[in-house]
Amino acid sequence: MSEDKNKTITGEISAIRFRNSEGWAVFSLQNQRLGFTGTLAEMVDVGTEVTCTGKLESSKFGPQMKCETIVPAAPDVSTDTGVVKLLQRLPGIGPKKAMMAVQEHGHEKAWKLATEDPEQIGVKKEHVETAQAIAANLLESYEATVYLLGIGLTDHQAQTIYSIYQGRSIEIVSQDPYRLTEVDGFGFLTVDKIALKAGISVGNPSRIAACIVFVLDDGASNGGHIWHNGWSLAKTVLETLTQTAMKAEVPMTNAPDIEDIRKQVHFLSKDGKVSVSKGRVYSQALLRAETSILEYIGVAHA
């Protein structure tokens, strides 16, 4: 069996048969005869509801889905089931203890105890502070991670973003995603893909500005050039913006033009991020570095 079109299947994980250190796993969903393979986020375990998207194929173990994305659903603290799932994230609390806590106290009080007095639901005294910190952070991190995985980030990328921006993760990615270029490992091309999937328009001014800086930096890194003339810069920026949008399969409605690029060069110049001189556009950071080197060499030979 093999199908070219992606399928989407939602269900609760009933068993994880294999899982390596990078999260790649072989697992089963309740009421599904298929096997499933793919990378599970750190938060995902048996009992987690997930939405799997991928291709159906045959294997020596029978039909299976090779998942391209696996997006978990955030537990709901307004239900017994949701609180049981969350309590299992606390140190020393397994499925049985979590269920007993909810049965004894009710889901509302059990969750309150997790944040205020976790010893009452079975957490050992030496782990109380850790449990309280996890509980306080759990819903927020779940919501952010589910959102980030949902727009196509890997678990590692989602965890990296959340570790830096915490409760502002969704806000940053949805409203000001190009700030992510400040994070190690998140270059413009990676961030642009994230931003477009988060709903940023192809002609967004922040997107154009970030691409200008990228093109200038890339020209220096790969071509040894610390400047572009205005025409070559605009041409390269337009090509880059078009290519990344096409790869992300985003409509080119309100696509940027040369005038949009000129405006952003002007704004970047006013902000001190680029310099413009005699038709040449420089990355300010690279220009400073080049000037410093020349001054050093001049001093050294004096």
Image: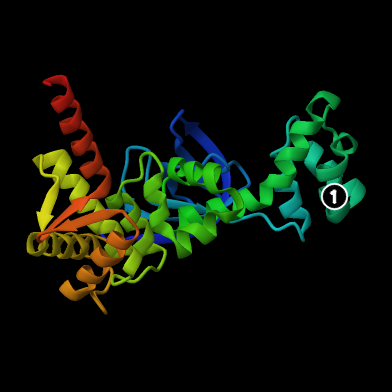
| Image position, residue 170 (x, y; %) | 53, 58
Examine the image and state in which quarter residue 212 appears.
Answer: bottom left
Examine the image and state in which quarter residue 197 appears.
Answer: bottom left
Task: Choose between 174 and 22: the one closer to the eye.
Answer: 174
Q: Which residue was labeled with disc 1?
A: 112
Classify 199 as above or below 14: below
Residue 5 appearing in the image: no
| Image position, residue 143 (x, y; %) | 60, 55
Image quarter (top left, top right, bottom left or bottom right) of the C terminus: top left
Q: Which residue is drawn at 15% across and 32% down?
A: 294
| Residue reaching furthest to the bottom | 254
Residue 139 appearing in the image: yes
Q: In this view, does 233 lie to the left or right of 102?
A: left
Q: Which residue type does callout 1 highlight?
A: Lys
Q: Is residue 20 left or right of residue 112?
A: left
Q: Which type of secondary structure does the marked residue at label 1 adopt?
A: helix
Task: Choose between 62 and 109: the one closer to the eye.
Answer: 109
Q: In this view, does 128 lie to the left or right of 179?
A: right
